[in-house]
Image (cartoon, coloured by chain):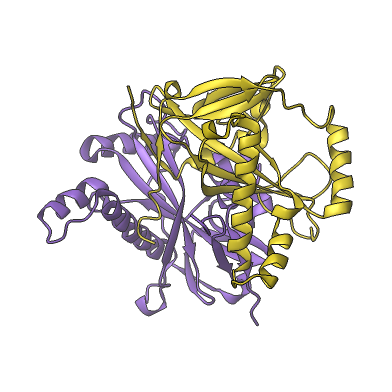
Chain colours: A yellow, B purple
Amino acid sequence: MVGAGSAVVNTYPLASYTFGTKEPKMEKDTSVADRLARMKVNYMKEGMRTSVEAILLVQEHNHPHILLLQIGNTFCKLPGGRLKPGENVESALSISLFGRFCVSYFSHAYVTEIEGLKRKLTSKLGANSPGLVPDWQIGECVAILWRPNFETTMYPYCPPHITKPKECKKLFLVHLSEREYFAVPKNLKLLAVPLFELYDNVQRYGPVISTIPQQLSRFQFNMITTN
Amino acid sequence: MVGAGSAVVNTYPLASYTFGTKEPKMEKDTSVADRLARMKVNYMKEGMRTSVEAILLVQEHNHPHILLLQIGNTFCKLPGGRLKPGENVESALSISLFGRFCVSYFSHAYVTEIEGLKRKLTSKLGANSPGLVPDWQIGECVAILWRPNFETTMYPYCPPHITKPKECKKLFLVHLSEREYFAVPKNLKLLAVPLFELYDNVQRYGPVISTIPQQLSRFQFNMITTN
């Protein structure tokens, strides 16, 4: 366990990254009600929804900032999204039963989540030219959230007596290299928001993003200054 | 990195633990103003205060509960406390300079924090008879909080432009065995509070304890039922 308390994350200046644009990525739903209705339909077909989101860190003025995608004038979200049925735990398990290697339930599920998050990040922020897409380094899982019902509320635990949660969402730290090129869909804005702006700001960022500073507090940030 | 997302914590039923009492442990200060004044005096003598607190987990009704010490009728705190000057980073470093082994700054500081937390746990919850004191298994650091000024507010990051924070507090998960004996000071009550009661309940538990559910969300709880 020695050393477990001092995970170090390198963060590079926002100015060392390059931002371009690409074709719009439209939201699938135009309202919260539509979104919850689509969730219900998918649940009937595929069971519990599994989603993965990324915390991408940069630094400015020696303070960590998080990259958020802004839709319209107010709503912000982390890059990521829903895993395909082929990327979830159940599929991974059935593959492992017929595969050549005996893999543990959790490590296999973890690998498929990682691959799924890489796919989502490339879809949301990767250039159309594969050579320019970042080599996404998916790091620590920092939070897991549960949706007990077809409602907007999610909890950082599966509430007691809920045997069939409707969604499980995992947040992962993604370790960026010193230089990257991000292609931002034209209908979205990519913002670098400081931790002190997110903290205790549930009104503006919602209950998940506003508690990211707490989730990251155990990390030691190595703020690298480049020229 | 594979597996980093699925840390497993065994939790045992509250009923498998035994609780006794011991002599009172009085608070050093009778008011918040006294506490901040004492903090200032200690800062002048010893520099930044370092404190460590423990998250002790049990389970009831298949849901994780945290052990909190209640003082009077309302105020709750985690077991733990201030490290002695001999347990902080600076002392550890000066020892290592003259010691036989070359140890890294962080791993050495970490070891002294762990020993300091064990000492605090024994003082707060250990029996007077050493053979009955739990063999405290200090696990993952789950949060680090900073006090920028001699005020009650702490943040999950060191705010920008603060070069001399007044306190750094670390929260560690402590892995309990299946059976333990806790001796609770007579002036305190030991409560097992479910995560769902802490969540989003800043009014009752304050900003640190009320966000413990988020800090723990990445762990998978293995709820063990014993007879």
| Residue that appears at 56% across and 64% down | B8
Quarter occupied by residue A101? bottom right
Pick the front one: A120 or A38: A120
Q: Is residue B4 left or right of residue B196?
A: left
Q: Is residue A190 left or right of residue B98?
A: right
Q: Residue B62: x and y, percent?
A: 70, 66
Pick the front one: A194 or B117: A194
The answer to whether one can see residue B163 in this image is yes
Which quadrant is the C terminus of chain A positioned in? top left
Q: Residue A223: x and y, percent?
A: 36, 32
Quarter occupied by residue A33? top right
The answer to whether one can see residue B75 in this image is no
Q: Is residue B109 left or right of residue A68?
A: left
Which quadrant is the N terminus of chain A positioned in? bottom left
Residue B149, placed above or below residue B87: above
Residue A2, placed above or below residue A115: below
Q: Residue A189: x and y, percent?
A: 63, 20
| Residue that appears at 41% across and 50% down | B27
